[in-house]
């Protein structure tokens, strides 16, 4: 491989530079491509460029569809233009503020942070719908705008603040991640949640106070209330009768589902196969797979050997060991991972030695004399070629060994890299070794991400549990509220296992949204249940009252948001399809948990005490 080829395969420092290189290569290739002369462009740079472009295109298109769908569903539920415009306005303002903060702190938008628009859509719509549902409900009865605003804020305002505090607290725990994009998700998504809360509590009531809201005439109003009573109220009443009338059956069925889900969780496999995110017919995927198969490797594993002394590479012993390592790696294969051709400074030295000896085959070898090695390398360097820069530093103390490897699942490199590291440690006890390159970096990123995410989820659950207990004010209710929070997450993970959906850097982030939305609905339910229970001293009555008030908003937000996320299932990339399916599913499961598990728990825990004779 000559110097030009070497420089072309080097990874660029920024995504913009990478895109420019790929565009330039494509432009050149298109000049010479013909039916009988196929040109394949593959490798990490090409895959990264196409992935970035596809993600941006898909996210923009389906986020727009999600906005349209959410808006349409909000209109159907509220039957008012303000019920559509105001929630979406809160979403847009929250998203603009969050993205602006990222720009101010120079945090780039990477693959993980591309979920921010969807997450802000979910959170912002949820907060505003809870306020608007109560506002319209009271406004139809009182016909007083001021009274309706005071009622909606008094009923749901504190719950919105509580949900924002717990969701943001859980997200901020991700800021400790060792993977920068995931840490950015935690920092900026958490900040975005707080901004959405501020807009909902301060700006939304102000807008409701000045924007005209049509008062429905008496006849239409009665028909509307009747329709709502027969549709939503009767549905919620039936849910309430089931959850309060059969609490033990519900809890037993839920326990069975959770156990079954845990069994599915055991089947989850960790994976980060970026190439498989692309459609099977995608040109970049086909080119990369063909080059991997035919030319044994489209990306590189880079090994840097540091002798620690100037001109350390004049030592024939070091060079001989490098030759043995190259020969060993070229025959090495573990599962899907194999090593193709290996290059280092020894390749240059052998070619120079052969050229100085009449190109005789037997002289394609490393000279075993330090002075001769120094002379030949100096001669090659003075010949005008700059290939030496690709394999060593100016002091000839460090050597680069580049090995071609396939673009496969990053987790498949576990055994391969362990074996390579063992070989290097044994072969070079006197040399400092650094293993890098795209394949090694992808593997390390996944390993660190898995560890960081697991730690962050534990921190998030601890933080959320403490905050819920403090905000609700009762230890027992606060602790029990974590059951309907955890149940949908466990069930979603179980379904992932049973459906063989891999856990990768993208699907891991579904938990951010799942935790946030599950906690939000649970806090709204528990907060209002506590209020009604203190008034009636009867858990069943408190559950029914909670469902008829907060239950309405929970139903609206869950329906709107699940549909908005299910739209992503029509994307072209598998990671977005899984993202939409799992997030929409988690939202529905969270609603079911708050409709059945939470009421059942409250009825069982708050059973009326028997009178003492």
Image: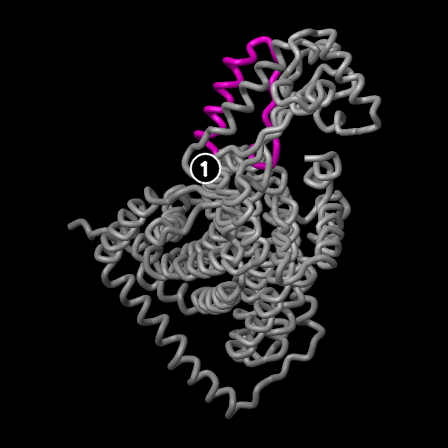
Which range of residues does the magenta coloring cover?
A: 412-440
Q: Is residue 34 visible?
A: yes
Q: Nearer the viewer, residue 356 or 125?
A: 356
Q: Nearer the viewer, residue 62 or 290?
A: 290
211 vs 426, left or right, is right
Q: Tell me if residue 438 comes above or below residue 82 in the rendering.
A: above
Q: Nearer the viewer, residue 326 or 435?
A: 326
Q: Is residue 178 visible?
A: no
Quadrant of the drawing holding the N terminus: top right
Q: Position of residue 197 (x, y in %)?
A: 62, 55
Return the residue found at the far left: 613
Q: Which class describes the residues within 10 Å of circle 1: few (<14), some (14-19), or many (20+)?
A: some
Task: Provide the residue designation for mark 1.
Answer: 412
Q: Position of residue 138 (x, y in %)?
A: 53, 74
Q: Quadrant of residue 525?
A: bottom left
In magenta segment, residue 422: yes
Q: Tell me if residue 168 comes above or below residue 437 in the rendering.
A: below
103 vs 281, left or right, is right
Q: Position of residue 10 (x, y in %)?
A: 69, 37
Q: Position of residue 42 (x, y in %)?
A: 61, 48
In magenta segment, residue 94: no
């Amino acid at each position: 491989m000559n110097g030009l080829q070497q420089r072309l395969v080097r990874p660029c420092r920024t995504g913009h530079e990478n895109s420019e290189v790929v565009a330039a290569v494509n432009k050149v290739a298109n000049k010479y491509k013909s039916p009988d002369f196929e040109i394949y462009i593959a490798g990490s740079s090409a895959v990264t460029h196409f992935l970035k472009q596809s993600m941006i295109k898909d996210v923009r298109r389906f986020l727009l569809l999600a906005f349209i769908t959410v808006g349409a569903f909000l209109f159907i539920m509220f039957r008012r233009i303000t019920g559509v415009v105001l929630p979406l306005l809160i979403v847009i303002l929250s998203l603009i503020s969050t993205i602006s903060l990222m720009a101010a702190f120079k945090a780039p938008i990477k693959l993980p942070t591309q979920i921010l628009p969807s997450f802000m859509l979910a959170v912002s719509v949820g907060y505003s719908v809870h306020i608007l549902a109560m506002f319209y409900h009271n406004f139809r009865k009182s016909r007083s705008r001021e009274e309706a605003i005071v009622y909606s804020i008094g009923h749901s305002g504190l719950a919105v603040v509580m949900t924002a505090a717990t969701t943001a607290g859980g997200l901020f725990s991700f800021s400790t991640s060792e993977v920068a994009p995931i840490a950015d998700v935690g920092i900026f998504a958490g900040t975005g949640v707080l901004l959405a809360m501020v807009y909902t509590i301060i700006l939304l009531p102000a807008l409701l106070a000045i924007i005209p809201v049509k008062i429905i005439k008496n006849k239409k109003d009665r028909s509307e209330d009747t329709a709502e009573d027969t549709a939503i109220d009767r549905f919620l009443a039936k849910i309430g009768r089931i959850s309060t009338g059969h609490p033990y059956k519900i809890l037993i069925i839920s326990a069975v589902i959770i156990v079954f889900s845990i069994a599915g969780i055991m089947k989850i496999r960790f994976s980060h196969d970026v190439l498989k995110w692309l459609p099977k017919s995608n040109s970049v995927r086909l080119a990369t797979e063909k080059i991997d198969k035919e030319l044994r490797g489209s990306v590189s594993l880079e090994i840097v050997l540091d002798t620690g002394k100037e001109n350390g590479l004049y030592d024939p012993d070091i060079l001989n060991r490098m030759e043995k390592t190259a020969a060993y790696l070229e025959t090495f294969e573990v599962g899907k991972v194999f090593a193709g051709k290996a290059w280092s400074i020894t390749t240059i030295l052998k070619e120079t030695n052969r050229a100085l000896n009449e190109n005789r085959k037997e002289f394609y070898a490393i000279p075993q004399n330090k002075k001769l090695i120094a002379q030949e390398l100096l001669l090659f360097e003075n010949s005008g070629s700059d290939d030496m820069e690709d394999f060593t530093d100016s002091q000839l103390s460090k050597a680069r060994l580049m090995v071609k490897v396939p673009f496969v699942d990053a987790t498949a490199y576990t055994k391969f890299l362990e074996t390579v590291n063992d070989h290097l440690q044994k072969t070079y006890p006197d040399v400092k070794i650094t293993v890098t390159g795209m394949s090694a970096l992808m593997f390390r990123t996944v390993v660190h991400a898995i560890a960081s995410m697991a730690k962050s989820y534990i921190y998030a659950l601890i933080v959320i549990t403490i905050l819920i207990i403090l905000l609700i004010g009762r230890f027992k209710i606060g602790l029990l509220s974590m059951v309907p929070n955890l149940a949908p997450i466990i069930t979603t993970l179980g379904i992932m296992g049973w459906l063989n959906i891999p856990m990768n850097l993208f699907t891991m982030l579904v938990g951010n949204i799942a935790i946030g939305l599950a906690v939000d609905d649970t806090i709204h339910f528990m907060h209002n249940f506590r209020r009604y229970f203190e008034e009636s001293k009867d858990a069943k009555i408190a559950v029914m009252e909670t469902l008829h008030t907060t239950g309405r908003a929970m139903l609206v937000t869950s329906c709107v948001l699940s549909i908005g996320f299910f739209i992503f299932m029509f994307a072209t990339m598998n990671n977005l399809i899984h993202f939409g399916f799992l997030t929409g599913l988690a939202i529905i499961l969270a609603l079911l948990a708050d409709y059945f598990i939470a009421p059942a728990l409250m009825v069982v825990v708050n059973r009326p005490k028997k009178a003492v004779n």
